[in-house]
Image: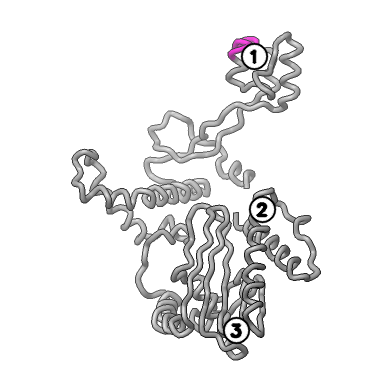
């Protein structure tokens, strides 16, 4: 998904530069991930950026626009830099726009620390050239129809940087400070093994054996507010445990087995011809009917006779289950997993 987003940013940059009249190479030829939705999103973003640019140009004497601009914020966060999707610097106002392609989380511009950090890096580059007093932050998230804007004064931004960002970043860099679990954890590499996150989610264990109708009214909102995060955390732990088990780690009471899979046609056209040659109509719709329906049409014996060479049941993906599960231990789990990668 990360590579797809990177390619989409290339497409967005190309469309904006093209609209600005620059001679640029179309990146679509090298895009492995491309579809009509990506094109529509990129075109919408380019149009939005050009609208911002043209509006700002009408009301100022000097203007500058930068795309995919690397900004250095090491003055506030040790060894840190970022890449701003779009920066527009005009008389008195600096605009930072960030494109978000994801649909999982609605991102807001208000008090957004990522955008504020980008703004600090941009100020360091241009403050001596432009008299900037206002910073405008924008999130453009087309797949959620979310375009959010927020403004902050340069004075307020610098105060946040000195009194909040800089000391907190230094603590983190030194390996100090306190862990803070929240929705942002889903982006962390340690999300499955972080003890602070585990402690926060395990607070719900106190309700584990309580039937819903026995809960107090004030307890219900607490559970509702944490339920989705609890599910996300549990899935993160399961994915991590599976990856560890595939690499050779053994968890007491658990084993690797082959997951469930469904049959599929090896070659639909060849299968349809074989059924037709046997005197049956394989089509229940514009396409060949599903395997279960086909087996019902032909009967199990005829199905095996006609289609045994045209149907396969792929090996199920490995899954981690309690040792009481009746399925046999997954064989050659490590090698199979490597091949899938």
Residue for point 75% across, 56% down: 28
Report the Cα–Cα distance between label 2 and label 3: 32 Å
Can the viewer see residue 286 in this picture?
A: yes
Report the Cα–Cα distance between label 1 and label 2: 45 Å
Residue 25 horizontal side relative to residue 125, left or right: right
Q: Secondary structure at mark 2?
A: helix
Q: Secondary structure at mark 1?
A: helix
Nearer to us: label 1 or label 3? 3
- Judging depth in this view, the residue of 205 and 102 nearest the camera is 102
Residue 197 position in % (x across, y down): 36, 59
Q: Give me the disc on residue 40.
A: 2
- Judging depth in this view, the residue of 172 and 241 nearest the camera is 172
- Judging depth in this view, the residue of 290 and 257 nearest the camera is 290
Report the Cα–Cα distance between label 1 and label 3: 75 Å
Residue 283 position in % (x across, y down): 68, 18
Residue for point 59% across, 77% down: 71
Q: Residues within 10 Å of mark 3 (few under 14, many from 20)?
A: some
Magenta-drawn segment: 296-302
Q: Residues within 10 Å of mark 1 (few under 14, many from 20)?
A: some
Q: Which residue is mark 3?
A: 91
Q: Which residue is mark 1?
A: 303
């Amino acid at each position: 998904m990360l590579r797809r987003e990177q390619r989409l940013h290339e497409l967005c940059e190309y469309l904006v530069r093209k609209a600005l009249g620059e001679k640029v190479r179309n990146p679509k030829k090298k895009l492995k991930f491309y579809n009509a939705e990506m094109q529509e999103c990129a075109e919408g973003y380019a149009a939005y950026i050009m609208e911002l640019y043209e509006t700002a140009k009408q009301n100022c004497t000097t203007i500058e626009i930068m795309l995919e601009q690397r900004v250095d914020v090491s003055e506030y966060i040790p060894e840190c830099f970022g890449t701003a999707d779009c920066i527009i610097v005009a008389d008195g106002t600096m605009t930072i726009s960030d494109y978000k392609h994801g649909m999982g989380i609605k991102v807001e511009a208000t008090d957004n620390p990522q955008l504020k950090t980008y703004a600090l890096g941009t100020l360091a580059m241009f403050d001596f050239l432009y008299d900037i007093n206002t910073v405008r932050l924008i999130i453009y998230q087309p797949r959620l129809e979310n375009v959010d804007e927020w403004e902050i004064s340069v004075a307020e931004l610098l105060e946040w940087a000195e009194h909040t960002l800089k000391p907190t970043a230094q603590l983190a860099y030194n390996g100090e400070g306190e862990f803070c679990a929240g929705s942002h954890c889903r982006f962390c590499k340690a999300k499955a093994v972080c003890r602070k996150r585990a402690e926060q989610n395990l607070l719900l264990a106190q309700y584990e054996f309580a039937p819903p109708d026995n809960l107090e009214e004030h307890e219900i909102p607490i559970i509702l507010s944490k339920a989705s995060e609890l599910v996300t955390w549990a899935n993160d732990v399961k994915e991590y445990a599976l990856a560890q088990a595939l690499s050779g780690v053994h968890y007491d009471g658990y084993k690797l087995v082959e997951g469930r899979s469904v049959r599929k046609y090896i070659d639909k056209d060849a299968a349809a011809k074989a059924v037709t040659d046997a005197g049956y109509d394989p089509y229940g719709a514009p396409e060949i009917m599903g395997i279960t329906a086909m087996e019902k049409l032909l009967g199990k014996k005829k199905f095996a006779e006609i289609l045994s060479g045209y149907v396969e049941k792929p090996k199920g993906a490995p899954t981690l289950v309690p040792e009481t599960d009746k399925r046999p231990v997954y064989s050659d789990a490590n090698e199979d997993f490597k091949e899938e990668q």
